[in-house]
Image (cartoon, helix red, strand yellow):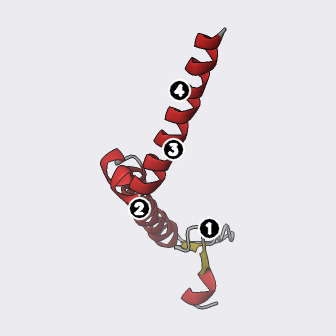
């Protein structure tokens, strides 16, 4: 079995080693597998941290969705104004 056979792809598109679990592995192979898993976990955590920061950056979200926010605010403004006008008539 080659090293390419030991690698699959996660849902995020990152290569992930398949758990071998084969009996008779040496302690060096187990240590290498553990170190590989640690490295992959570290990369996954960093990628996730970057994605969370990107999605929670409200200033960037406002810049990218300015038009939608303006339209939404106008709709809410008209709706509130219409409700207030109906209340005054009663």
SS at circle 4: helix
Q: CA distance from mark 1 to mark 3?
A: 34 Å
Residue 86 point in image, percent of width and height: 64, 18
> Which of marks 2 and 1 precedes in the sequence?
1
Q: CA distance from mark 1 to mark 2?
A: 13 Å
Residue at left 59%, top 27%? Answer: 82
- Pointer 2: what residue? 47
Badge 2 crowding class, 10 Å Cα cut-off, few under 14, some 14 to 19, many 20 or more, is few
Badge 3 crowding class, 10 Å Cα cut-off, few under 14, some 14 to 19, many 20 or more, is few
Residue 58 vs 11, above or below: the answer is above
Residue 69 point in image, percent of width and height: 45, 47
Q: CA distance from mark 3 to mark 2?
A: 32 Å
- Pointer 1: what residue? 11
> Which of marks 4 and 3 precedes in the sequence?
3
Question: Foreground mark, 3 or 4?
Answer: 4
- Pointer 3: what residue? 72
SS at circle 1: loop
Badge 1 crowding class, 10 Å Cα cut-off, few under 14, some 14 to 19, many 20 or more, is few
- 66 vs 87, left or right, is left
Question: Foreground mark, 1 or 3?
Answer: 3
């Amino acid at each position: 079995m080659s090293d390419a056979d030991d690698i699959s792809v996660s849902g995020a598109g990152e290569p992930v080693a398949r758990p071998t679990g084969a009996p008779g592995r040496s302690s060096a192979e187990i240590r290498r597998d553990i170190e590989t898993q640690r490295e992959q976990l570290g990369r996954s955590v960093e990628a996730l941290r970057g994605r969370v920061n990107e999605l929670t950056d409200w200033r960037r979200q406002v810049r990218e969705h300015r038009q939608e926010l303006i339209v939404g605010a106008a709709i809410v403004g008209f709706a509130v104004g219409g409700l207030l006008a109906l209340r005054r008539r009663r």
